[in-house]
Image (tube, rainbow, N blue to C red):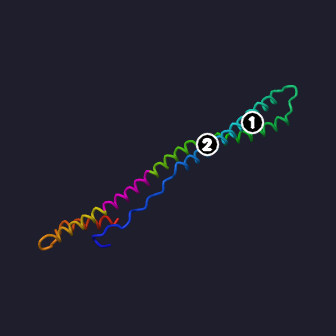
Amino acid sequence: MPDHEGPTSPPPTSPKTSPETSSTDSTSLEIREYIAAAIGAALVGVTLVLLVWTYQAAGVVNNFNAEAFGRQKDILLLALGFLGTVIGYYFGRLPAEQQANASRKQADAATNAAQKAKEDKHKAGQLISDAIKKVEQQSSNLEGGTPPNDALRTLREAERLLYST
């Protein structure tokens, strides 16, 4: 690249998400949350009913059926496993979603900062190129036509440093 020419085109800009996309995502997430809550509530209800039936079967003194109690106990063990999974999902999901949202915000901020830095670099390059052209133009109007070498050297060095990164 010649010393007096800057970049020819501005850096590309990142696409923005439309408000329509985020509202549909929000609605689908809300519906999904309601369905998950309904399934969780149903599982808790079934587990509680099985727990009550098992304790009632164990409490019958005169007509105790060990085989029926064993089956009820086995079903209750399965239901408690599912209940533990649902509770673990809800308690584990909330902190994970909060962390994901915080990470998403940090990534967006970093992307925006990088985009702004690219734009600032482009603007600085344009300013330096314009300054070099002005100094060269004004020096050609001087008697003798010798440019102020220190100013040009400084500007060209700044331009070189700017485009070397």
Kind of residue sitting beneath label 2: Glu
**Mark 1 — residue?**
46
Residue farthest right in this picture:
63
Taking the spot 67% from the left edge, 40% from the top edge, the residue there is: 84
Mark 1–mark 2 Cα distance, whole angstroms, equals 24 Å
Q: Quadrant of the C terminus?
A: bottom left
**Mark 2 — residue?**
30
Please provide percent x and percent y for residue 159: 28, 66
Range covered by the magenta-colored residues: 109-124
Neighbour class for label 1 at 10 Å: few (<14), some, many (≥20)?
A: some
Please provide percent x and percent y for residue 64: 86, 30
Q: Quadrant of the N terminus?
A: bottom left
Q: Is residue 110 magenta?
A: yes
Q: Is residue 32 above or below residue 14?
A: above
Helix, strand or loop under label 2 = helix
Please provide percent x and percent y for residue 162: 31, 64
Q: Is residue 126 magenta?
A: no
